[in-house]
Amino acid sequence: MSWHATALTLFPEMFPGSLGQSLAGRALREGLWRLDARQIRDFALDKHRTVDDTPCGGGAGMVLRPDVVDAACAAALADGEDRALVYLTPRGKLLDQALVRELVAGPGVILVCGRYEGLDQRVIEARGMREVSIGDYVLSGGEPAALVLLDACVRLLPGVMGGVDSAAEESFSAGAGGAPLLEYPQYTRPVEWQGRAVPEVLLSGHHAAVARWRREMAERATRERRPDLWSRRDDMRDGVAAKASAG
Ligand code: ADE
């Protein structure tokens, strides 16, 4: 059984979208993973196919009904696989590489894509949905966030990246027990372009020097651009030092 993703959405035509192209698209055609998009409206309970209603307590916008979304979840879960149920929302826990790895290790995901003002809290709780955000900004719906999450997952599936080492070396893939570093900058030919030269060390053929330079560049970028990630490294080092002095 290949890794299985189901999107529950009011806009199924947004899938596979970008995931029909490139690495993910080829893997989809080769059956390395599977994607279906189901129309939430098909689970509406009335003849008008109503999926939403006004927020209790007042306020702008509409809220997706718990009964309709619950029926859509039940249908997706009926295939028998024990898949994670994820609700994409700016209120969620931030998506990171650790969560991506965890989701890829399982049989697949069911992604609930909200629109309007969101989803009735009761169905989130009743179904034990994991609420996930892709960043601190508000999209007009969960679909682009679902595509982002799936892209991050699919490229880690066996066979998708074709034996490339880059998944292990790139930004956010920390080595054993380490906190992640941003990636070092890359260069290719021509060695001089518009008066800008490729850093000499990269042309030296000196592997240890290249590795050292890349490490320094990765650390500098992380320190300057992502002090939050950098301080996690400090915290980890402190943890190791504390353990060493305790033992
Ligand atoms: N839906 C709207 N904004 C979102 C975000 N930032 N992450 C996930 N889902 C969303």
Image: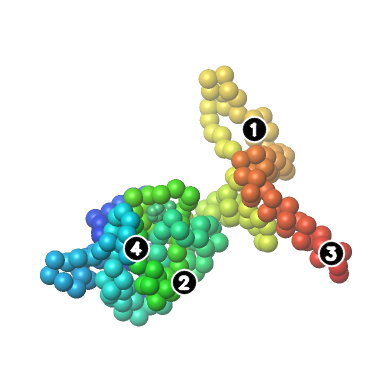
Label 1 SS:
helix
- Amino acid type, callout 3: Ala
Taking the image as shown, residue 226 lies to the left or right of residue 164, namely right
Q: How crowded is mark 4: few (under 14 residues within 10 Å), some or many (20 or more)?
A: few
Q: Which amino acid does label 4 sit on?
A: Gly
Q: What residue type is labelled 2?
A: Gly
Q: Residue furthest front?
A: 57
Identity of the residue drawn at 25% across and 60% down: 10
Viewer-nearest of discs 2 and 4: 4
Q: According to the image, label 4 marks what residue?
A: 57
Q: Is mark 4 on a helix, strand or loop?
A: loop
Residue 106's disc number: 2
**How far, Cα to Cα, is label 1 from label 4?**
65 Å
Chain-order first, disc 4 or disc 3: 4
Dot 2 or dot 3: first in sequence order is 2
Of circles 3 and 1, the one toward us is 3
As drawn, which residue projects farthest toward the top?
Answer: 195
Specify the label residue 244 is tagged with.
3
Mark 4 to mark 3 CA distance (whole Å): 55 Å
Give the quadrant of the N terminus.
bottom left
Q: Which amino acid does label 1 sit on?
A: Leu
Q: Dividing the image into four equal quarters, which quarter contains ligand 1?
A: bottom left
